Amino acid sequence: MTFLPACWLVPGDPGPFPAPFDRSYDDFNRFKAWFQTLTSVSDPKKIIDQIVLTYNSIKGENIDLFDFNCIESNPTNPIHKKIRYDVLKSIHKLRKEYDLSVVGTRDDEKIENVIGRILIYASINEIEYRRGFCDLIMPIMHVYYYGILGSYDIDFDLPLVEALVADSFVRFMTGPIVNHIRVFTETKYVNDLSARFMDLLKPYPIYSIMTNDGIEPKFFLNKWINLVFIQELDFPEVIKIWDHLFENCTPGYFHLKLISLAAGATLAKESKCKVLPSYQHLETIQAIEDLVAEEIIFRAL
């Protein structure tokens, strides 16, 4: 395999690209780790054909929904309008932040349209569209794109990447995690998880701060999710945090790991549990007094 640079944000540009859009020889391993957490399948090759077949079948059954151009069209369908606005805004913002050009011919597939179709696929799978979904897809697209490029066993193909990202995003949003990303509803799952989280915090000073001030665990969850998944952080830091969530983490403990990391998104004693305006490094997010996210996970196990 020829190791050529390629960037998912500008597929027609041969590079080079700034970090984090350069490539490394660890890309495939990262992809496998994310894929396993999101799908519970350790070897992506085993189900790739099935995923692609299902995705293409649903596209074929809904041609009118999938047949729109985020860049050139002026859609009349309400869901197309919402998706187009959010996709163009998010992609433009990311390209601008990293000074990435927009090159290619009219025949080149545009990443805006790829992400648009993924969002359409999610809506067909009864995932009600919400603003910010594009920001949730982009880290998955980033890792899957480079992961397939870095594989010796899987031939790179953008439609293949599109199908895999669409499938993983739907799995991500239809699992228990959806209760965290949306407005926090009173569900048994969230309540049980919050209670377990509070039990884990009891040995630490943060517990008395939360109980004395009447601060609910859901505050930490909500603020941390908005901070991370809606990209108030720089994109490289978002990837680091997703890596941390997926590293050596079985699906059963993924959500506990997420809620425990929420504590690291605030400095409760100094800011009365208000999220600080800017985080530049992952270490800042993980630290809160003597509480470290890894210690909580270790205790949970």
Image (cartoon, rainbow, N blue to C red):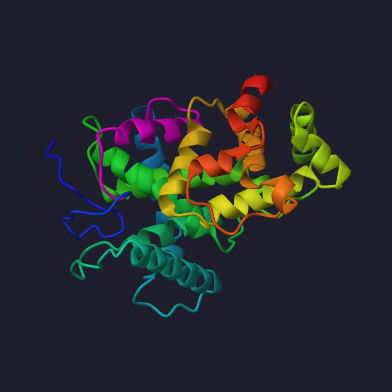
Viewer-proximal residue among 8 and 258: 258
Image mark count: 0
Please tell me whether residue 113 is drawn above or below residue 157 in the rendered image: below
Q: Is residue 76 magenta?
A: no
Give the percent coordinates (x, y) of residue 287: 60, 38
The quarter of the picture where residue 187 lies is top right
Is 295 placed left or right of 91 in the picture?
Answer: right
Viewer-proximal residue among 91 and 118: 91
Give the percent coordinates (x, y) of residue 149: 24, 41
- For the N terminus, which image quadrant? top left
- For the C terminus, which image quadrant? top right
Residue 125 visible in the current orientation: no
The quarter of the picture where residue 67 lies is bottom left
Residue at point 80% right, 34% down? 195
Residue at point 83% right, 37% down? 208
Residue at point 24% right, 37% down? 150
Give the percent coordinates (x, y) of residue 192: 79, 34
Please tell me whether residue 196 is drawn above or below residue 64 in the rendered image: above
Q: Give the range drawn in magenta.
A: 21-44
The quarter of the picture where residue 42 lies is top left
Residue 102 visible in the current orientation: yes
